[in-house]
Image: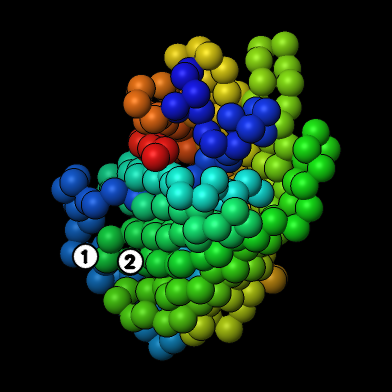
Amino acid sequence: MSHATIPYAAMQHTTGKPAHNGKIQPFLRHNRTNGSLTKLRQACDGGVAMIQVLFALWFCIVAAGPAAAGAWLREKGHGFTSVSATLYRFQGIYDYKTAVYAEWGMAERLTVGLDINEQPGLTGHALIFARYPLWDKASKGRFAAELGLGAHHWLGDWAMMHKLTLSYGKGVHTSWGDGWLAIDTAWEQRRGTRTDIYKLDLTVGLSTARRIDPMLQVETSYVLDHRLFWTVTPSLLIDGGKGKTWVLGLEHKSDLPGGLNIKFSLWREF
């Protein structure tokens, strides 16, 4: 993989950039039946806030997403974008979710960005965020803090939300080549849900001169008095040239046993 397509942090002594959950505008036919959506709306009538949280975790966990913002900052004047779509099967119906992620090096010690995640007609969020470095010891790794402010929606009803993330990142050296390790912990509050969401995500991957490299993401979310939600996504990073990387992954969720979702992403650095 050329330096143009290796994540920015990976170019800094292979302290590679963790993956981002991203978003593209829907281009697939949204085939959820009106009956299924009506039943879901009826089940959530009466302000059952916890159901909102559980479905948000079910469809929009990641890495999502994002998924993992990472401890690395963008070089001043440089940016990164990720767009993605995930195809999944829910109650016998095939459907999709989309996401967009972007970040920009505003200053030497400040990166700002946008994180959008959408399950059409059901749930999603839009956040702006700022990331600031806390500690950088080169080979020992680095820490960064990130604050995100924005809004989430549930069946068309929008409310404010905020998210605080502490991230650790480190370059790794293996017999298969250099790569990176990223750990992200987050606390999230969504108005209207009256509960906190706690997240812990892990991303490991390789950044080599090969055209194809592997990556693994493990994303977890926890709500008080409920079991842990998790998603495991092994992926292939495919060098697309000119700063582009195609990502193809198989996503397995704890609440969709026996099923594998297909995730397509395009990363671009500029």
Q: Which mark is residue 238?
A: none
Amino acid type at mark 1: Gly
Mark 2 or 1, which is nearer the eye? Answer: 2
Question: Based on the displayed image, in which of its 4 quarters is residue 158 positioned?
Answer: bottom left
**Could you tell me if residue 107 is visible in this image?**
yes
Depth check, front residue: 61 or 212: 212
The residue lying at 35 percent from left, 59 percent from top is: 118
Q: Is residue 175 above or below residue 69?
A: above
Image position, residue 77 (x, y; %) = 46, 49
Q: What amino acid type should be assigned to the residue bearing mark 2?
A: Leu
Of mark 2 and mark 1, the one earlier in the sequence is 1
Secondary element at tag 2: loop
The residue sitting at 46% across, 32% down in the picture is 250
User: In the displayed image of the protein, which residue is found farthest to the bottom?
Assistant: 46
244 relative to 9 in the view: left or right:
left
* Residue bearing the label numbered 1: 35
Residue for badge 2: 122
Label 1 crowd (10 A; few <14 / some 14-19 / many >=20): few
From the viewer's side, name the closer residue of 100 and 6.
Answer: 6
Q: Do we see residue 55 in this rendering?
A: no
Residue 36, percent from left and from top: 26, 62
Q: Residue at x 39, y 58 (%)?
A: 117
Residue at the location (64% across, 74% down)?
A: 196
Instruction: Count numbered badges in the picture.
Output: 2
